[in-house]
Image (spheres, rainbow, N blue to C red):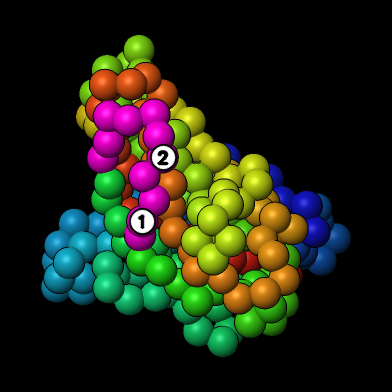
Amino acid sequence: MKRQFFLFGFNLLLIGAFSCKKQGTEGLQSLIDMQALESNQSCPQGGIIVKSGIDKNRNNVLDANEVDNTKYVCNGQNGQSGADKQIFLPIYWSPNTTSTTPIIGGEVLKFSKKNYVGVDSIILVANPYVADQTNTAEIEVYNMTDNVPIANSKIVTNNLFSSTGFLQTGNLYSAFPDKEIRVGISLKSGTAGKFAASGNAYLILYRK
């Protein structure tokens, strides 16, 4: 199933993620709004809040009256259940570096895509940033078992911290090996001696 993903600031907008049709009308789009969440009663250590619903008025915005599901993915826990259409796997690591040699770390997951029945898409969502826009921050998913990056998972940006938002890759499903691996994150600076950093990253898995 082909999916298209569009990102605006801190909001993650997914178009065509699901097929939803009404009688005699063109299929409607399913939208997801994903935002950073500060420490609060629901998530004492912060995390993300994910709202989803159908774009009934076709304006490509998830309006308040269109939200039919709200999910908190708190730092320190995974966002998944057997029935979830979207599964959020946090990779807890907030690195910074001034080196063009990648640093590797993060919450190590014993991850196998085969363990998630019906999943056909996996994307990386992260918020890398720099202190100087003449530099870039480069982040990608890293296969720590085989010591290689996951193909096509690199995100490169010159966003400043003040304007940083979640950025995402395309579908990485076929790039993940058909076995259990340890998953981490690789980060490097585009220019030696210049600062690059990132907040926590997420693998988001989508069921058919």
Q: Which mark is residue 102?
A: 2
Q: Is residue 145 magenta?
A: no
Residue behind mark 1 = 105
Q: Secondary structure at mark 1?
A: strand
Viewer-proximal residue, 92 or 38?
92
**Residue occupying the far bottom of the picture:** 82
Residue drawn at the location 27% of the way across and 73% of the way down: 76
Q: Which mark is residue 121?
A: none
Viewer-proximal residue, 197 or 26?
197
Q: CA distance from mark 1 to mark 2?
A: 10 Å
Viewer-proximal residue, 186 or 3?
186
Q: Quadrant of the N terminus?
A: bottom right
Viewer-proximal residue, 163 or 152?
152
Q: Amino acid at mark 2?
A: Pro
Specify the segment rendered in magenta.
96-106
Residue drawn at the location 39% of the way across and 75% of the way down: 78
Q: Is residue 99 magenta?
A: yes
Q: Is there any visible trace of residue 139 in the rendered image? A: yes
Q: Quadrant of the C terminus?
A: bottom right
